[in-house]
Amino acid sequence: MSIHLQHLESELEENTRRRGYDFYCEGRVRSVFNINGIEWMAVVQGYDDHVVELRITNDTVMHYACNCNDEEDPCKHVAAVLYYIRKESHKQKRNDPSGYDEMKEEISYLPPHVLRYLILKYAAQSKDFRTFLGEYFNGDTRK
């Protein structure tokens, strides 16, 4: 199912839309990362933290996933992140080429299991990152 960001109100089920919008308004969408201009990851606080992954091209969601057990498709966590992206993605820093300051602030509250998940997910997708991790864990941090 593809979802256009400008048509959330007509493309999401009413209950999902309402609950997702409530989560967004309550500030539960945290640590939103635009990985490469297309892929997004975010953490949504609920009873547990939920990791949401999105792939968005030309304001259209081509793929979404959440680690929750909700039966709705998409779930309220995905809807909350979509509202965040639609309304606040312009606020993300784009002038910090290293990204260090933004990352430090954004990940400071994340629980260890979410950090492990994010590292493993990125390592699975990036050979350069796997190489970096291998060098880091082997004590070769000179590069």
Image (cartoon, grey):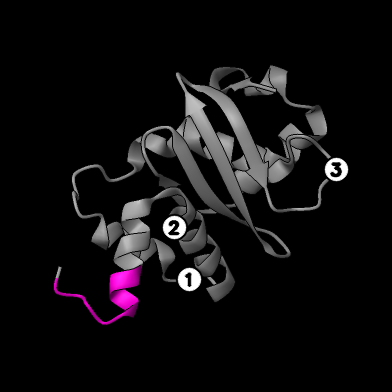
State how far apart marks 2 and 1 are (Cα): 21 Å
Which image quadrant: the N terminus? top right
Q: What amino acid type is highlighted by mark number 2?
A: Ala
Q: x%, y% of residue 103?
A: 34, 60
Q: Amino acid at mark 1?
A: Tyr
Look at the picture and state if 11 lies above or below 129: above
Q: Horizontal and vertical percent for residue 42?
A: 52, 50
Residue at 51% x, 55% y is 121
Could you classify mark 1 by the number of other residues whose Cα lies within 10 Å: few (under 14), some (14-19), or many (20 or more)?
few
Residue 123 magenta-highlighted: no
Residue for badge 3: 71
Q: Which residues are magenta?
A: 134-142
Q: Residue at x 57, y 44 (%)?
A: 53
Q: Kindly identify the residue that appears in the image at 36 percent across and 38 percent down.
A: 36
Q: Viewer-proximal residue, 28 or 67?
A: 67
First in sequence: mark 2 vs mark 1: 1
Please report the residue visible at 72 percent of the width from the left and 33 percent of the height from the top: 17
Position of residue 116 measured from the top left corner of the image (x, y, whole percent): 52, 68
Q: Which residue is mark 1?
A: 109
Q: Nearer the viewer, mark 2 or mark 1?
A: 2
Where's the C terminus, which quadrant? bottom left
Does residue 7 appear to the left or right of 95 in the view shown?
Answer: right
Q: Which is nearer the N-term, disc 3 or disc 2?
A: 3
SS type, badge 1: loop
